[in-house]
Image (cartoon, rainbow, N blue to C red):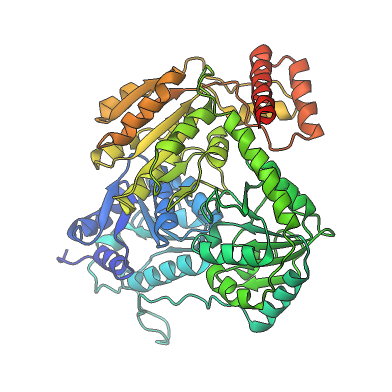
Amino acid sequence: MSDTIAADQLVERLVAWNVDTVFGLPGDGINGIMEALRRHADQVRFVLVHHEEAAAFMACAHAKATGRLGVCLATSGPGGIHLLNGLYDAKLDHQPVLAITGTQATSVLGTGFQQEVHLEKLFVDVAGFDELVTNPVSIPALDDAAVRSALARRSVSHLTIPVDIQESTVLENPYEGGLGTSRSPRTAPTFVDVPGTPRATDLRAAAEILNGGFKVAMLVGQGALDARDEVIAVAERLQSPIVKSLLGKAVVPDTHPYTTGGLGLLGTRASEDVMEQCDTLLMIGSSFPYTAYLPEPEQARCVKIDIDPERAANRMPTQAPLVGTARETLQALLPLLEQKTDDGFLQHAQRKMDAWRADMRSLEDADRAPIQPQYLMHVLNEQSSDDAILCCDSGTVATWAARHWDIRGRREFYLSGTLATMAPGLPYAIAVQLAHPNRQVLAFVGDGGFAMLMAEFNTACRYGLPVKVIVDNNGLLGQILWEQMALGFPEFGVRWDQPFDFVPWAQACGGLGIRVEDPGDVASAVKSALEFDGPALLDVFTNADEPPMPAKIRYQDAKGFTEAFLHGQPRRASITSTLFRDKFAQLTNRMRS
């Protein structure tokens, strides 16, 4: 074997694409690639994880937090299989990620060799670009094509490389046949994005609809994260409330007078009212999936801005789809919009939002025991810095974060928005901390989700990353419990017989671990964790009977809860008591105000 192997070309090409971090786990199916990474360790950082699923989550989070390509690496067979959940997270949240896997030597492919899994077939749904490398000379060109596809489609690309190809000498080209109509492919690591401004005729059509609306609402998503100033300027011009998808939570500050917060199961009553009453909807960078919360098609005309033509009219009848980036499209659209002077619709939404905020504050009760999860998030919100980045897991924790974590200053917020998978909170936080070493990075996770990939806390400790992990430890799979009850079914299979105690694990890894059971200890524990110079874990035992109630209780919800109680729902008295105390706190607060 010569000094230079084909895998060196792979890594060097990644460097040419400005890739500086690869998340992964070694194995005998990628020894050639690992050797190439060792040789280029001064240019590419290899982050060693404990599970390949975490590597894929980290690559997705890296893309979300930096706007650049995320890269993950796994060995053949089981290693590649483990990537899939994190890759689907990237696909569904439209993040550019390149997955690189190894496979068996070309001489044994198809013979049923040890760990032989045809990953290029397995990945066909998750990856928009998905290729098996069969010749070492094609590696640079296939790498270019994979990266370009991931960036262009904002999705997943996959390259799987046999071990003999990885380790071969660069100039080997054993199978050049045919009629001589082709040569070894040579391309360049370049990419030019599509123009960000829609056609002038499309902009005029959109402006006509927006200017003709009397009750204009805006729904903004992650595609507008870099367009805060433009979103606010358009809202002021249209006198429009700003509703936010969960992925778009950081588009505008939660304290801004024009926003009514989130929409959907984790949203606000004010946002639901806005959607029910508007006659015109401007959707910006959002593919909001819960269409039951959008205006009825005959109720409102729609203008939708999206970078992808496929998604520019995909959720409701859209009279004026605009294909372009949020920032550039809004900049071009703003001069065409007339200043509206009637702010009655906006003021109505603001009054509703003031009432909602008061209701949420009443649930942040420091005196209630067990610890209210809303109070835990309130304390974390108050004590965290104005440039903190919160990475949230799926489940009831997402409800508490959506409603009690405020975007202010340069704060950011990330979670698995569309796949809504459990377990990404900690891997996200690790990747974000690596990308932003001088920022405060927090992981807000449930005990169920944290337990799935808790080994990655050791990863944070090995790399000396000062991530802060806050575990909402309620001893159950809370979101699933309440979903069962909403359907009229008594809970089943959702409670752990013995609650986890995560503090010994945090300490064994070399981090700080603090167990919190008393509401009076929450503030001091959060302060200690945030001030600790290294990884810290707060294991907070919260009220297991606190429901993540929807903003508006519909008949079907109430009917389901009643049927669950009648069919033998456990802990009926405790759940009823919690609901009563929540409502009493809200009513008392309203009477005081």
Q: Is residue 3 left or right of residue 522?
A: left
Tell me: residue 376, above or below residue 45. above
Question: Residue at position x 69%, y 45% from top?
Answer: 351
User: Could you tell me residue 201's position as x and y percent?
Assistant: 69, 83
User: Could you tell me residue 443's position as x and y percent?
Assistant: 42, 39
Q: Is residue 516 visible?
A: yes
Residue ranking furthest to the right: 298
Tell me: residue 307, above or below residue 378. below
Determine which quarter of the picture holds residue 420: top right
Q: Is residue 172 left or right of residue 111?
A: left
Tell me: residue 474, above or below residue 270. above
Q: Is residue 149 left or right of residue 187?
A: right
User: Which quadrant, please, contains the N terminus?
Assistant: bottom left
User: Could you tell me residue 149's position as x and y percent?
Assistant: 47, 68
Could you say which is closer to the camera, residue 464 or residue 206? 206
User: Which quadrant, please, contains the C terminus?
Assistant: top right
Could you say which is closer to the camera, residue 375 or residue 202? 375
Q: Is residue 27 visible?
A: no
Question: Residue at position x 62%, y 77% from top?
Answer: 335
